[in-house]
Image (spheres, helix red, strand yellow):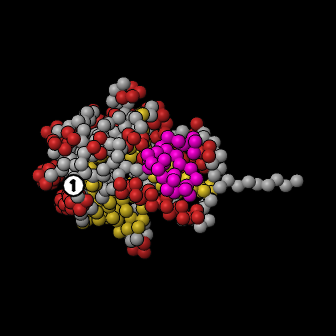
Amino acid sequence: MKTKTIHKPTVNVITLGCSKNIYDSEVLMAQLKASKFEVSHESESKTDIAIINTCGFIENAKQESIDAILEYAEEKKSGNIDKLIVTGCLSERYAGDLKQEIPEVDSWFGTKDLPRLLKTLKADYKQELVGERLLTTPSHYAYFKISEGCDRKCSFCAIPLMRGKHLSFTMEELVTRAENLASKGVKELILIAQDLTFYGLDIYGKRVLSELLRKLSDVEGIEWIRLHYAFPSGFPMDVLDVIRERENICNYLDMPLQHISDDLLKSMRRGTTREKTNRLIETIHEKVPDLALRTTLICGYPGETKQHFEELCEWVQKTQFDRLGVFSYSHEEDTHAFGLKDDVAHEVKQERMEKIMEIQSGISYELNQQKIGKTIKVLIDREEGDYLIGRTEHDSPEVDNEVLIPLEKGGELNAQIGQFAMVKITSAEQYDLLGQVIS
């Protein structure tokens, strides 16, 4: 007697927002694959189920998430997908409102609802797979979340509303995860958290990021470790010692500073001042002279006057950040700043963002010109057109500068994707370097 084979539905996961969401999608995909689902990431092929992992951080991100949900709602109405599931930050925050607005969505889940989501799909949540992921990034680097949530009280930020309180993963668990990734060919770990510097306070009673970094840098096969999202107030200085001591910890630090005006820093509840910020930056460069400092700024926060903005511009020009991003203030309900008047016009916010990036473009161009003639270690990420595209230790994927290496005649690769190469820089633009492989 023949038995009927029941095929599991195919699932397409769509990820919006930050690297923390990418990590969460990868964990979800690994769990689904372990339950024998055929799972893909942002596939254009027809699938049975679409799961949208949303962002709810600022207005633009929320709108992007809503647009994606509406797009897939139309796909469901057209019969191209059978089931639509929404998860992530937007769902955590607004599911109650959105359920009535978008009835095509079958289920809504928050940021901590993975077991419940899997149960809805008749998939088993496998505890032994905790930490396992189906990488959506190129196989040679991976985002590496060391904690969840945030205990900071920044006035403009809705992340604690969506992600909850800070929760560190144990060092043993993280080292095991790193070893697992290294065994699969991952060479670069990009450490992410809402605030890396808080690591360990909840489970070890003190900040122990430096100790974690030493343990991770001992993992065989990991050649680069990169630090994202370090809070300036209470920054643990021993982290700088580890960066300086360990060759496989990149001379790179992403530290969102948001503003420099004392008035606005106080209103933002950042726990620091202009003087303390400048002193911290000086200390960072004194301890690790070759460190590339990346920051993020906010334009148009409530009460930001023309004088505040001019102060910010002068500071950016003087400080000469290696990498810098900027976004306009988003008036988020249930945050402390929501009680303030959103008194900077949208057009002014945009003009101020453009002005900051114009300043940074000039700074980046001058800094890049200084690299011409130097030979730099580059990690090759991909092939694109007539070039190999790579990054230096001073550059994170997606957000920072890239190194373009012309392919050899006939389109032959002159370096291997996922491998390191020594590249001599031959020319430079605002955000790109051009070079030739030396070895």
Q: Is residue 323 visible?
A: no
What is the quadrant of residue 326 in the picture? bottom left
Q: Residue at x 56, y 64 (%)?
A: 75
When the figure is inspected, residue 2 is found, relative to residue 226, above or below; the finding is below
* Residue at the spot of label 1: 344
What is the quadrant of residue 222 in the picture? top left
* Residue 359 as seen in the image, left or right of residue 60: left
* Amino acid identity at mark 1: Val
The magenta span reads 88-117
**Farthest residue, direction right:** 1
* Residue 294 as seen in the image, left or right of residue 199: left
Q: Residue at x 88, y 53 (%)?
A: 1
> In the image shown, does 393 or 67 lie closer to the viewer?
67
How packed mark 1 is, by other alpha carbons closer than 10 Å (few <14, some 14-19, many 20 or more), is some
Task: Measuring from the top left, give residue 280's x and y in whole percent.
Answer: 19, 39
Q: Residue at x 21, y 55 (%)?
A: 344
**Farthest residue, direction bottom:** 410
**Farthest residue, direction top:** 205
When the figure is inspected, residue 129 is found, relative to residue 418, above or below; the finding is above
Q: Residue at x 60, y 39 (%)?
A: 126
